[in-house]
Every structure is written in structure tokens, then in C-alpha cells.
Amino acid sequence: MSLLPHQLELLSPAKTVEIGREAILHGADAVYIGGPSFGARHNACNEVSEIAELVTFSHRFGARIFVTLNTILHDAELEPARQLIHQLYDAGVDAMIVQDMGILELDIPPIQLHASTQCDIRTPDKARFLAESGFSQIVLARELTLEKIRAVRAAVPLDTTLEFFIHGALCVAYSGQCYISHADNGRSANRGDCSQACRLPYTLTDASGGVVAYDKHLLSMKDNDQSANLAALVDAGVRSFKIEGRYKDMGYVKNITAHYRLLLDALLEQRPELARASSGRTEVFFTPNVDKNFHRGHTDYFVNGREHGDIGAFDSPKYVGIRLGSISRIGPDWFELDANEPLANGDGLNYMHKREVVGLQANRVEKLGKGESGERWRVWPNERINDLPGLKVGCDISRNRDHAWELALTKQSAERRVSVWLKLEDAPSSVKGERLMLTLTDEDGISVSESAMLPLEPAQQPEKAQASLRDSLGKLGNTIFHAEDITLATSQAWFVPAASINALRRAAIARLENARLAAWQRPPRKPEAQPPVAYPDTSLSYLANVYNAAARQFYTRHGVQLIASAYEAHEEAGEVSLMITKHCLRFSYNLCPKQAKGIKGVQGQVKAEPMTLKTGDETYTLRFDCKPCEMHVVGAMKKHIFNAPPPSSVPVSPITFFKQRPAS
């Protein structure tokens, strides 16, 4: 089914089908996963047959499965992509998440389409165009404020779902607007192969050559965390809450999904006009903690405006974890630590030395008793003390791998059950006393009945017989169901053998499971408005990522007259914007003209002059567009990459020219 306006969807990532199953059990209403190819995460691929199994598992809970086909496609890849979409449709997939508009020109099945965040959806006009061009769900740019989200909501039809990232790693550039990886090494972010140049250390200099920042990770953002903003996002119009992380492991997906499931459930308790987008109730067997998984610090980015908090992780792109305490004593092969939490053998610890994170593993730990500022622990690391640079008394120690906590997540850490009501009664039109009927009705209103001919006798101990029947009917432990109520409505108290009533219960449960799957309605493809709506612009630069003839045909059909090829087509030889970002280094270092506004003696003195960014042998120019508050990282594609054929996963035969017709 399509998401209704009052429903809230928790959308979790899955690198593998196994992780997808756990995401559902830990409370996801939908899961997005990569297929065998054409996804924006090169190393997160799954076979269609595996995805089909995940579809069946998810639909039992009324949860949806989306498959990512969110890269730009070479002309040679269009037909394989079309065939793949047909295969995924046949596998029962509910929607495709796409970037390339050429897909809409292909002969594809009536599967629902979602516009990827790679489509760079920042404006009401762009959002409305996509909504009227056949997209049911649109993934907004992470950089939008609440005010801008509200503006988008007001501009698009009510049947269009707004999806927004609420947690995970942040790309510093607008999604779909980063070309620095392809320019430097031929690995295209728009084709799922980003080399993460944003996590490198850079030196920043001003127009006069003065060093503003030295060897800092100036393009590395903290991780997105909208835990405190869910209600505000709901009020702004967001209905699908997306967790980033198709490269993340099982523990991350379990933990972060459970964290947001609990938060959304609490919100739903307060807002009875809203509802969960799938069925069942999740019980979590651990306490979720967003600080226990890899992250670079937390930020709510621009949701509440640029001035709200620090967004950069300039010191290190690594995961430092949670501070435990400081070293109180160092021995020949150990150190002692006054810790605020218990330690365990195998914990991953670290400390900062000369702006670098130094990691170590606790091979063995021993609790010594009470310290000055917490419990005192002795730690024997996996490296010699003399080989750990900068380790000394007073050094702050953090933990970035909690071995005991992670071990707990390798076991069953949640279960999800659908409520069901059971009613046992004499079957109608039967020989009295010989036939019973068990009716099951689940929380979605799906009802089934199963009858059985049984050798019934009046119970000599009615109360005991009734209690035994309730006990047998309520044994749903190995199913997805939870008995909310059991009604015994027989004409009298019967003695029924336990084996007989258990067989009746199992048959009814199997019938209900099949009925739930049969009742599932796949969301239909949203029809395109007719006549086709006009695209907001009549010309497109390389930033539109048009990489094939079908995409060119799509934009032409929607009124675009001048269409440049995608950057990956190798037609932009000179310097261009390789990255466009809302993150501004002038603002970060208090060099923004807007910050100087109104300050006596400073106003008018600060200019948005270009700056220079350097890492290794690479040098880029920073240009600042102050009206939309954007920074452009400008550079050129390396010659050997520019002269290479445009990338394609499908072999493309080179064209050979002959001076005369070759002999046949």
C-alpha cells in the first residue's frame, strides 16, 4: 500500500538481506536495499532471489521493501537496468529509488518510483515537478531547514510522501552535486563509487596566502542526528524518516532502528491522529544508544538553521566514542583508569595525540575498586606501553568499541509481533459436540477460520478444561503473533485433547499468515500528469547529470531546450564546481561577511574573496556564493581521466575507423 498522509514510516538501510530482516524485527516500517547492480553503494549488492525472500518476510508485517537503482546510467546500461527492474517487480519489490530520469522513458513495469536524494531536491518547484512526473515519494536534500521543508510540503500534491534523512553520515556536498572523486581518480559518486575526498586533511589559505587552518579535515561533517527534531519534522510535513547506512553492519542497524522506533512510538502515543505505517509491536531487549556505534559527533545540520550548533568534524573523521575517564597510573605493561562505566576484555579504546586518534585494544581488564573519579580498572593493552605515543598519566581515554554491548547485539535483541484475537466456538451446521471452529482476527482486520472434527466429550472439570484450552490456544511463541484476547464461546465446556487443539491452532495460524500475504497490496505506480509538466528551467548544465539518451529525451519532453552532458561524459575539460555545499569554511572560521554585518569597525571589511584548499598534490579554489549561502570547490578533471572513455559497467566496444570498407 502507499503511505497515507497520517502514517509515519521508519525507513532503515540494509547492506544484506539478513540485516534487512533484523531491521524489520527492530521496528522498521520499510527497508531500502541494493540490488545486484546500479546502486549508489558499489559494495552493497544483493541477488534478486535473496531480495524476494526479504519481501515475503517484510510483507508479513505490512512493511515495504525499496530497492536502490540510484546511479546515473550509461546508454549501454539502460537495457540491463530495464531488465533488472522487471526482475525486481516480479520478486515483489514495492518501489524503486532512482536518480536517472532516463528510467522513466523505459518500458518498465508499474512499480512505484521514489526520487533519490541524488536528484538534489531543494526547492518547491523541483519537488512539485518530480511529484507530477510520476514519483510517489521524494527524498529531500539533507540541507533543508524546517521552513523550507514546509514550503515543499505546501507545493506538492497530498499523495506525495516527503522522505528525509534523520540519522547517519553526511555528505558535505548536496547529494548528486559532488564530482571531486571522479575528477581526481575516476571514481564517480553519481555511479556509486565515491572515494570520500571529503574525509581527507586539508590546509586552507586566504587570498593573500595566509594559513587559516592547517592539516584539518575541513570537508568532513559530523553525523546527522535528528532525535530531538522528530515532532518538528512531522509538523513540517515529513512522513518517511530515513536512516543512512547501506554500508553499516548489523549492530548499527539494530541499534539505530530500535532507537528511532522507541522515539516514534512515544510520539505516536502523544499524537493519536498519526499512525505507524506497518503492523506489529516491537519489543527491544537492550537499551539503544546512538553513541555506541561509529559516528563523528552529532549534529542536526541545518534543520534549525545555520547558526544552530557546530556541523564540522574537523579534527578527525574517525570514531572516538564515549569518554571513559583519565589515566591515573602507568605500569610496565598496563595502565590504570578511573572509568565511569564498566570495561570488558576486548574493548576498543583510544586517546588523542597531536591531533591524531591513537587506538588500542584492551586484551585484559581487571576491576581494582573505587578510584578518585569512578571505578578504577587496570588495562593490559594489545601493544607495548612504550609503543603507544603520548600515553601518560592524565590522558583522557575513550571507548569506541564496547565489546560486551556489541556481543549482546550478536544475539536475539528484539522481537516483533502482530496482535491477534482468538475465538473458539462450536462450528455452525455441525453435529453438535463433534466440530469446533477457531477464528483468528489480527490487528489489521484480517480474519480466518479453521474447523476440525474432534472427538468431544463434556468436561468433568469445566474450569480446568477451559484453562487448558486457553493455555493451548495462546501458545504462539514460534509465530509472529501475540494473543491479545482468547474467547471461549462453545455451547458448553468440552474436554479437547491437547494434541487436537494444538493442531487446530497451528492450521489457523498458517491460514492467517497466508491471508496476510494475500491481502498485501503493492503500491501502484503514480501516473505522470498529462500533458507533461514543464521542468522549472529551460537549460541544464552538467549538474543535471544527464548521462544517456533516454534522460535527454525525458527532459526534452518536459520542455528543456539546452541540455549539457553529465560530468562523467568527459565534456568539461576546464575548471568547474566539483562540489557545491551548504557548508561554508568562511562561516566556520568567522570570516563570513554576514557575520561581520552590524559589527562596528568590522562591517564592510570582510569580503567573500576566493580561498584555496590543498591536500597532498591536489589544490582547489573555494568560491563563495553568499546569496544562497553556498561554497563551491572548484577544480578540473585530471587529463588521463578526461581522455578515458566515460565509465560504464557494461563493456562498450570502441569504434574503429577504416580508410576503406573492410572485406566481408
Image: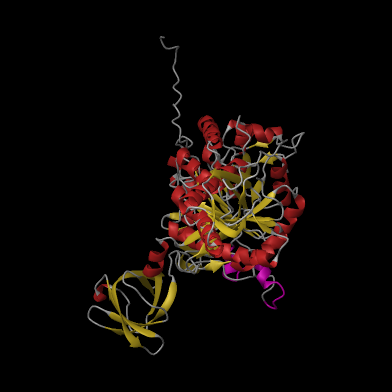
Q: Is residue 353 visible?
A: no
- The image's colouring method is secondary structure
Where does residue 54 sit, x and y in percent of width and height?
Answer: 50, 45
Tell me: residue 246, above or below residue 598.
Answer: above
Q: Quadrant location of the N terminus?
A: top right
The residue at the point 69 percent across, 33 percent down is 556
Q: Is residue 105 left or right of residue 150?
A: left
Q: Nearer the viewer, residue 317 or 479?
A: 479
Answer above or below: position of 330 versus 109: below
Q: Point out the residue furthest to the left here.
A: 332
Is 587 one of the magenta-colored residues?
yes
Q: Say above or below: 418 vs 535.
A: below
The quadrant the C terminus occupies is: top left
Q: Position of residue 442 (x, y in %)?
A: 62, 52
> Residue 248 versus residue 208: which sits nearer the camera?
248
Between residue 249 and residue 478, name the one nearer to us: 478
User: With 58 as the anchor, is 304 left or right in this view?
Assistant: right
Q: Position of residue 139 (x, y in %)?
A: 63, 51
The magenta segment is: 584-601
Location of residue 75 (image quadrant): top right
Asked whether residue 591 is in view, the answer is yes
At x 75%, y 47%, the residue is 157
> Which residue extends farthest bottom?
372
- How many marks the image carries: the answer is 0
Quick check: is 659 in the magenta stretch? no
Left or right, residue 2 beside residue 333: right
Q: Given the current orientation, which residue lies at the most extreme top position? A: 664
Q: Position of residue 587 (x, y in %)?
A: 60, 67
